[in-house]
Amino acid sequence: MALGGLLVVLCVLGYAWGAVRLGDRVQVLAVARPVAAGQAITAADLRQVSAAQDPGVQLILAGQADQVVGRTAVVPLVAGTLLTPALVGDAAFPPAGKVAASVALKPGQYPQGLANGARVAVYVSASGMGSEGKPAPAAASPTASGVMPAVVLGVDLAGDGQGATVITLLLNDSDAPKLAAAAGSVVLMQTAPGGN
């Protein structure tokens, strides 16, 4: 009988805790359909969803939809993504301090299944010819200043017609000269959503 009473008390406490947690939910904006990077966001691209309030995550409230419509997606947005201020930008694209660049890569130079919106680390091999016509020694590290973070804007499997896939990246404008001057190969490695 005591065990039964304890079970009832635990059930009541569990229900009360669940009700309190559900009470911390708010209506926020989510992506209703895929939006390409640089594309203007329309009302049809948005939907309202219920999400738990978290002080560490800045979500856009459903009542602020008019502040989002007409602005552009900073990165490719997939359906179901909860919108944050960092994902939408001004009408100009690419955003200030960023550039869009395309690279033609062969299989093995990028992860299979790479999709729009993926975060990647760009490694550039500084191989080339030395001053005497001999191959220059390979660099000890991928780049002198480290790995270049980027976001995938597009993956064109049709590629360049010579077996390479053309991948368009959004990266820091300070990294653009390193990518453009790469005499050797470029390798992409996918990183975690919050990773570098």
Image: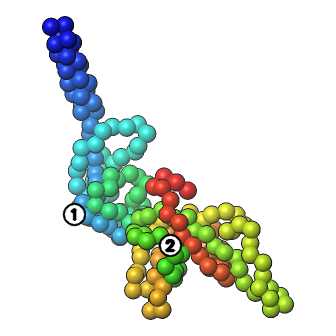
Name the secondary structure under disc 1: helix
- Circle 1 is placed at which residue position? 44
User: From the viewer's perspective, is 143 left or right of 120?
Assistant: right
The answer to which quarter of the image holds residue 45 is bottom left
Q: Position of residue 177 (x, y in %)?
A: 65, 75
Q: Can residue 146 be seen in the rendering of this structure?
A: yes
Q: The residue under label 2 is which amino acid type?
A: Tyr
Name the foreground residue: 52 vs 90: 52
Name the foreground residue: 139 vs 49: 139
Which color scheme did the rendering employ for the protein? rainbow
User: From the viewer's perspective, is 167 left or right of 15?
Assistant: right
Q: Residues within 10 Å of mark 2 (few under 14, many from 20)?
A: some
Residue for point 28% across, 47% down:
28
Q: Position of residue 21 (x, y in %)?
A: 27, 30
Residue for point 21% across, 27% down:
19
The vertical placement of 147 against 2, above or below, is below
Specify the quadrant that holds the N terminus: top left
- Circle 2 is placed at which residue position? 110
Name the foreground residue: 169 vs 3: 3
Name the secondary structure under disc 2: loop
Sooner in the amino-acid sequence: mark 1 or mark 2? 1
Q: Position of residue 81 (x, y in %)?
A: 32, 55
